[in-house]
Amino acid sequence: MDFTGKVALVTGGANGIGRAVCLGFARHGARVAVVDRDAAAGAALVAEIQATGGEAIFQAADVTSSTDVRAYVQATLDAFGRIDCFHNNAGIEGKVAPLAEYDEAVFDAVMAVNCKGIFLGLRHVLPVMIAQGGGAVVNTASVAGLSASINMSAYVASKHAVIGLTKVAAGEVGGNGVRVNTVCPGPIDTRMVHDIARQVSPNDPGSVAARYAGGIPLGRYGTAEEVANVVLFLCSGLASNITGAQYVVDGGRLASPAGVTSSGLR
Ligand SMILES: NC(=O)c1ccc[n+]([C@@H]2O[C@H](COP(=O)([O-])OP(=O)(O)OC[C@H]3O[C@@H](n4cnc5c(N)ncnc54)[C@H](O)[C@@H]3O)[C@@H](O)[C@H]2O)c1
């Protein structure tokens, strides 16, 4: 996988999975635009990439704002002139609560980031790729986009929506040389999965994590780097015949539903 001369744009790029993707792209030669609402972590990541000889910029943005999304697209074009790879990744988990009690404002907030944020990213990056005559997009969904997880209604709905948007986009822009795929992580060792465990058991999140890991055939959470490997593959020429697809990175959890509990983890 060689991204020399390519430009990669990553939302939610300052932390967790997005951060690993930014570092992976930089390591493989891409110039990287890091987009996030966490300005401190974004600036630190850019400095880290530059310290190893890479090229990167940071653009602060809230992906729910079309003004901010237009601005991160323009900032990337101003800095690097094109967008070859787009990891449309920013997401939030919301609250762990039964649907019959789920807070309306939290539902709206989750849908705004995870669904509308993905839509806006596609809405403003795809025209750039169409004009270029090519590009590759990876939207971050989740195994929660492929199956239910009780007590996570907003998250599950939003991630099913990401897969729907991916399929529509793939059908619309395939003729323009643009591929659009989805990565569907299972439990990955980032802030998000630990927050969910804390919500399930504020006094003993460690026991929740152990129970979840025990339900995964590979016996552990995945790492952000393991998801990043798949994102880079899908953006690379190795994936030249892949579009509209969902790539599960979950240690076998979805294939083995014995691990499914009332946790809401997925
Ligand atoms: N960690 C997991 O177990 C897991 C599993 C499946 C899917 N995912 C998905 O992976 C993606 C990345 O999650 P993560 O695990 O790295 O979590 P994370 O919380 O470590 O990182 C998410 C990043 O997105 C940014 N972000 C959140 N809302 C934003 C907004 N409105 N505008 C701009 N930036 C925003 C945050 O600042 C943060 O840097 C999410 O879409 C998440 O739903 C994670």
Image (cartoon, helix red, strand yellow):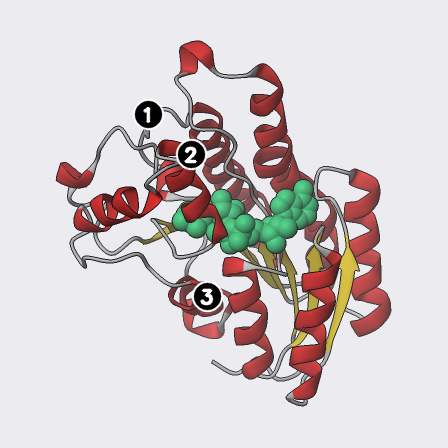
Q: Judge left or right: residue 245 versus residue 25.
A: left
Residue occupying the point 49% across, 26% down? 154
Residue occupying the point 46% across, 43% down? 195
Q: Residues within 10 Å of mark 3 (few under 14, many from 20)?
A: many
255 lies above or below 111: below
Q: Position of residue 45 (x, y in %)?
A: 66, 71
Q: Position of residue 261 (x, y in %)?
A: 22, 32
Mark closer to the chain start, 3 or 1: 1
Between the C-alphas of marks 3 and 2, the distance is 26 Å
Q: Which residue is mark 1?
A: 150
**Amino acid identity at mark 3:** Ala
Q: Which residue is mark 2?
A: 199
Mark closer to the chain start, 2 or 1: 1
**Amino acid identity at mark 2:** Gln
Q: Position of residue 10 (x, y in %)?
A: 63, 60
Residue 252 has which mark? none
Q: Residues within 10 Å of mark 1 (few under 14, many from 20)?
A: some
Q: Residue furthest bottom?
A: 53
Say what secondary structure mark 2 lies in: helix
Say what secondary structure mark 1 lies in: loop
